[in-house]
Image: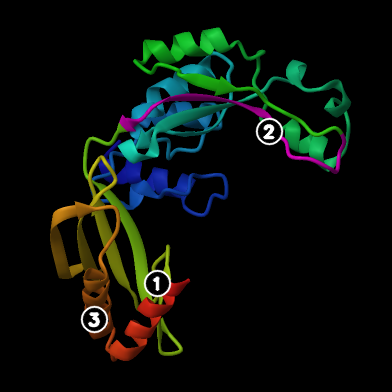
Amino acid sequence: MTLEARKKRFLKNVVGNPSRGQGELWRRNTYKYPTTQQMDQFKKYHVIYDIDPALRKVIIDLNSKGYRTGGSCQGHLKVNGRGYIKINTSRNQLPERFRNRDTPLARMLSDNLSLKDIDPNEVKTILKKHNIIVTSYTNPFYPKDEVNGRFSNQYVFFFPVILDTYPRESIAYYYISNGNLETSLTPKKDSVKLVQLRDSNGNYTGFKLIKNGKLIWKKELSTRRQGATIATVREIQQATHRALGSKFDIEKFKAEVRKTKTS
């Protein structure tokens, strides 16, 4: 299967799917799409396709052994501290009060259960085979009744961050609404894409503005920071207003800065 065909299959599975991850790393030009064989395995085990690249093999391995995964993250940046893999419990491990009951909570807890009881030691061994060392894990927990209390139907296994092998990008979109500059995580009809570049420590290394696929502004940072300076934010907004044919109101910008400092 060609790269274009794999990309088309991937996007069909991911875009608009409410169970997919929220990171949207696949929007990057550098994103490495799963192989055809990996996507076949994801389909077989009902796994959403946008698994982090470093976890694809271990997620397939876990599901092939009867463990149904329900969310994962490799961590990506040192600042995040750790990554995790969530595994849904088995029916046998559900509290008896939730088995064979036709209530909203019971149906929710019974969705996509593991085919076997969770054995933390076996899970650790499987992860270790993929060079992932579990540092800790949490057990599922349930409310005392159908209405009250928080619950989790998953074991969560934590491990040290697996760093991205390429620069991290965060993407947002600027657009004008009622004369104001607004942001969105998805593109609008007339918008400018803001790309924020970060290193493995989470520090910003640069910013780019792109409109209609063309680079219209960029800035590389000589000193890496956890966030953008006011001066850089001002430059970004000025360039964005210019690209969208809107006037940049410097006094309004200063007022917003003062408000932020005092809040």
Q: In this view, does 240 lie to the left or right of 140?
A: left
Figure disc tally: 3
User: Mark 2 and mark 3: span between their CA atoms?
Assistant: 46 Å
Depth check, front residue: 193 or 248 = 248
Give the SS element for disc 3. Answer: helix
Residue position for label 1 = 261
Residue drawn at 45 percent across, 12 percent down: 126
- Callout 3 amino acid: Gln
Residue position for label 3 = 238
Category of crowding for the residue at label 3, using alpha-carbon neighbours closer than 10 angstroms: few (below 14), some (14–19), many (at least 20): some
Depth check, front residue: 86 or 159 = 159
Counting residues from the N terminus, which is met first, the one under dot 2 or under dot 3? 2
Depth check, front residue: 126 or 3 = 126
Counting residues from the N terminus, which is met first, the one under dot 1 or under dot 3? 3
Q: In this view, does 32 lie above or below 59?
A: below
Q: In this view, does 103 lie above or below 86?
A: below
Q: How is the image coloured?
A: rainbow
Closest to the camera, between mark 2 and mark 1, is: 1
What residue span does the magenta drawing correspond to? 145-162
Q: Where is residue 3 in the image (x, y as percent from the top left)?
A: 27, 41
Residue position for label 2 = 152
Q: Is residue 143 left or right of residue 131?
A: right
Residue drawn at 48 percent across, 71 percent down: 263
Q: In this view, does 230 lie to the left or right of 15?
A: left
